[in-house]
Amino acid sequence: MTEENSSAFEAHQNLLRLRQSIDNIDSALIYILAERFRLTQAVGELKATHKMPPADLQREAEQIIRLRETAKSAHLDPDFAEKFLAFIIREVIQHHKAIALQKAMT
Amino acid sequence: MTEENSSAFEAHQNLLRLRQSIDNIDSALIYILAERFRLTQAVGELKATHKMPPADLQREAEQIIRLRETAKSAHLDPDFAEKFLAFIIREVIQHHKAIALQKAMT
């Protein structure tokens, strides 16, 4: 094996190793997200039963502040953490609206 | 306290309890995401050093199939899992491009 080939082989092995860890982390993220949606499903049902509005801007503002702080202490870009939360909340609010609609129809 | 008030109070207490769990889960997600970015940062550096392209469509296709399966077993909407992965990968590829650009400039 030439030196260049050997270095390319080693790089590829390193890539595979890193990807295996990324895959494990992604599985963990999916299971935790599933649990988060079970909780927000319960919130959605509670809100629909008690006719509370699906979105809560004050709660969202507090979550953003808190998660930006958490991101800093985890050395994660706080802007990314905020985008991530917005992505999740968009999905959750859609679910809440669907639950409220379903309750209104039954 | 009237019955209606008591029920509203209980609902609010339940909401606070659920939100506390959601906050704990969000902190866990942020710490795991931070670890994921440490790994993809290492992938980005490896790719830049060995002049591999930032995106890898075959790898992404495999990740989608795998995560949709994981989502099913976690009772999470597989479409949401796929959207979530796309969201993360978009961010990672931007990081990889930035790393490659930085390496090219130094």
Image: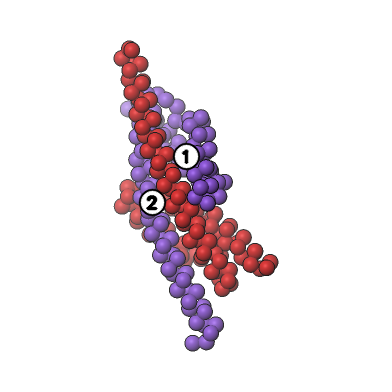
Chain colours: A purple, B red
State the residue position of label 1.
A89
Amino acid type, residue under disc 2 in the picture: Ile
Query: Residue, x 32% and y 50% (percent of image)?
Result: B74
> In the image, what residue occupies the spot 49% across and 50% down?
A74
Q: Measured along the vertical axis of the image, is residue B54 above or below residue B37?
A: below
Position of the C terminus of chain A by quadrant = top left
Q: Is residue A86 above or below residue A25?
A: above
Counting residues from the start of the chain, the first of labels 2 and 1 encountered is: 2
Instruction: Point out residue B9 in the picture as x, y percentages from the top left corner.
Output: 36, 21
Please state the horizontal and vertical placement of residue B7, each as a whole percent of the image.
32, 20
Question: Where does residue A44 sit, x and y in percent of width and height?
Answer: 38, 33
Residue nearest the observer in this picture, B22 or B51 = B22
For the residues labelled 2 and 1, the Cα–Cα distance comes to 16 Å
Residue B103 visible to an observer of this rendering: yes
- In the rendered image, which residue does mark 2 sit on? A30
Instruction: Tell whether A43 sits left or right of B99.
Output: left
